[in-house]
Image (cartoon, rainbow, N blue to C red):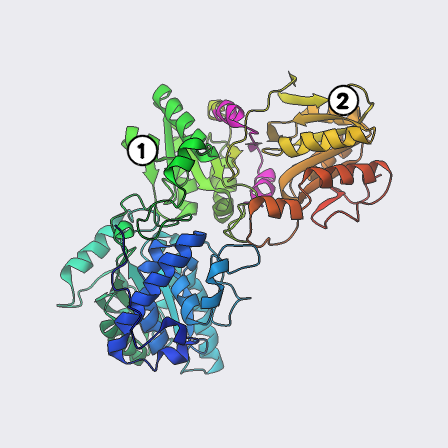
Amino acid sequence: MSTPTGTASPSDPISLHDVTSPQVLRDFAPGELPTLAGQIRAFLIAKVGATGGHLGPNLGVVELTIALHRVFDSPSDVLVFDIGHQGYVHKLLTGRQDRFDTLRQAGGLSEYLSRAESPHDLMENSHASTALSYADGLVKARHLAGERDRAVVAVIGDGALTGGMAWEALNNLGAAPERPVIVVLNDNGRSYAPTTGALATHLSHLRGIGTRTTPRNVFTDLGFTCLGPVDGHDISALESALHRARSLRRPVMVHVVTVKGKGYPSAEADEADCFHTVGAIDPATGRAAKPVHAILAHPPARSWTSVFATELLSLAREREDLVAVTASMLRPTGLRPMAEAFPDRVFDVGIAEQHTVTSAAGLAMGGLHPVVAIYATFLNRAFDQVLMDVALHRLPVTFVLDRAGVTGPDGPSHHGMWDMSILAVVPGMRVAAPRDATRLRELLREAVAITDGPTALRLPRENVAPDTAALARMDGIDVLHRSAHHPLDVLLVAAGATPETVLQAATELERHGMGSTVVDPRWLTPVNPALLHLAARHQLAVTVEDNTRTGGLGSLLAQAAADAAITTPVVSVDLPHAFLPHGPRNQLLTEAGLAPDAVARTVLRALAGKPPHDAPATAGSPAVPGRAP
C-alpha cells in the first residue's frame, strides 16, 4: 500500500483550506506546520492522482515551499522556481486550491507556473536551467532602482543545474557581492532520472560532509557563501537557513537536501521515475486507475516513442557505429532499451541541449553515427549548435524529435511547433515526418544511412495510428488517394501524422463534387521536385501540418513553386503564429483548423476564389501573401 505518511486526521485544529494566501501561512505556529505538510501531501496525491501531472517532484518540496513563503514576502520578494515541476505547492499556498480539479484541463490550472494565474508567478517557461539568469537580471534591476529590501530567491534543482545556462548565471551572480541573491539548490539527486556527471559526484561529497564545516567547494570558489546541506523536510532548519541567507546581503547558496516523492512510499521507491509525471492513479496503491480487466480488454496503443525505441535497438544490433545521445531524457525519448543493451553507446549528458548537439557532432567527427533523441521543444535551445556545429560540417547526425507538434496538457512552452521552421533554414538538413509505425521504421533507417549531412524525424505525442497503405510511391512520395469520378481539383499534402484527417477531408470534398489527390511526402525538406510536378497538375495545392506557417511545409512548397514558375496557388492549413494554451491535443488541433471539416471548408473557399475567413485564424490563409486564388 502507498498510503501517504504524515496525513492529517479530521480532528486537526488547522486546515489547508485556511491557507488562502502566504500571509495566512505566517500565522501558523511552528508545531502546526508538520500537520499542514501532511495535508498538502494528501491533497496533492488525491488531486494530481485524479488529473495526472508532476507528482514526485512536488511531494519533495512541501516543507521547502512552506519555509520559503514564511520567510519571504511574495510577490514583493520574488520567488523564481526553475520550471513548474516543483511549483504545485507554491500554487496551493498562493490561493489556487479550488482550481486543482482543473489541473491540465482546457481552460484550467496550468501544469507549470503561469503569470496569468497569479502575481506570485514570475515565469512560466518549462525549459530548465533558466531561473538563475532571471534572478541575475532581477537583482541587477533591484540594485539600480535602490530597492535593497526586496529579496530575489531562485529555486533550482540539481538536475537543472547540469545545464550550461545555469553556470553562466552563477558566473555572473557570484562575481557581484554587492548584489544580494539567494540560490536555493534543491538537491534530490534526480531530474527525470539520477543526476549525472561530475556535479552529481560533487554534491554527493558535500552531502557526506554534512554541516560539520563549510568546506571550500565549487560554489564558494564562484563567490557564494554556502549554507547547508540543510534537511529539506525540517521546516525549522529551513527557515533558520533562509533567514540567515537573507541577513548576509550577498550572493548565498542554500544547499537543501530533499527526497523526491517524499511521504508517498510508491514515489519514494520509484527508481524508474514513473512518479515524476503520472496519469490518473489510485492514491491508495499508486497504480494506474484503469482497472486491470479494462486494460486486458483494450490493450494500450503503441506510442511513437516505443516504436522508435524498438527500431533503434534493432539498428544498434546491426550497426556498431550507431550511438545515441540525450539531455536527461533517457526514458521519455525511448533510449532506455538501447542503453540497457549497449550501455557504452548511449550518453545522457544532463539537461544541456547545446552540449548534447555539439557532443554529437564530435561523435560524428570520430566516425560514428549519433542519434540525438530530444523533445522537439527543447531542440529550440540548440539551434546554433545544429547550424554551426553539425550542419556547417555536413556531419551525419540524426535528430529524433519526440512530441513534435501539439502536445496537449503541458502548455505553451512544451508544444513542438517550431522545430520544422527552425530546421528548414539549416543548409543540408533533411526532415522527415512518418505517418505511421511502418513509415517510422522505414524513415529512421533511411535517415541513419545518410552520410553527408544531418537528418531529423518528427514524432508526435499521440499513439501511433494504424498503418495507412499507399496506392503507389512516386519518386519517394506516397500517393494515398486519387478521386476516381471527379476531376483532380486539389492536391492535398498530408505531413506527418495528418493523413487520417486529410483523407476524411478528401471524402467530404467528393460529396461536393471536388476531386483530390492525397499524398504523403515522407521527407518534408528539401521540397521534393516530384511534389512540385504534382502541384502543377492541380488547380490548388493545400498542405496540412502541425507546425507554424513560417518555415513550415506550406511556405516551403509555395516558395519552391514560385521559384519554378509554377502558378498553382498554395494554401497552408497549420498551427497559429501564437503560443497555444494547454488542453486535449485533439481539441487544440480542431481549434486550429486541423480537423477534416475545417480542411474541406478551407479548400472549398479557396477553389471558389474566396478568402477562408470563416476558418480559424490559425489555418487556411495563403502560405505566401497574394498567392491564394
Give the labeled residue for mark 2: 483
At a point 70% along the width and 26% down the height, the residue shown is: 518
Magenta-drawn segment: 416-444
Amino acid on which disc 1 is placed: Ala
Relative to residue 32, is residue 493 drawn left or right? Answer: right
Do callouts 2 and 1 mark residues in contact (Cβ within 8 Å)? no
Which amino acid, by three-letter code, is at mark 2?
Ser
| Residue 53 visible (yes or no) | no
Q: Where is residue 250 in the image (x, y as percent from the top left)?
A: 32, 75
Q: Would you place residue 9 above or below residue 485 in this image? A: below
Task: Farthest residue to the right: give it.
Answer: 609
- Magenta span includes 198: no
Image height of 567 relative to 232, above or below: above
Q: In the shown orientation, is residue 197 left or right of residue 568?
A: left
Along the horizontal axis of the image, is 88 left or right of 555?
left
Secondary structure found at label 1: helix
Foreground: 189 or 30?
Answer: 30
Tag in front: 2 or 1: 2
Measuring from the top left, give residue 534's x and y in whole percent: 74, 24
Indicate the quadrant where residue 595 lies: top right
Q: Is residue 325 left or right of residue 499?
A: left
Residue at 77 percent across and 34 percent down: it is 562
Find the distance from the CA under tag 2 to the CA under tag 1. Answer: 47 Å
- In the picture of the structure, the residue carrying the numbered disc 1 is 339
Q: Is mark 2 on a helix, strand or loop?
A: loop
- The crowd level at tag 2 (other Cα within 10 Å; few <14, some 14-19, many 20+) is some
Asked if residue 524 is positioned above or below residue 243 in the image, the reply reads: above
As rendered, which of 37 and 272 lies closer to the eye? 37
Provide residue 363's location: percent of width, then percent of height: 38, 33
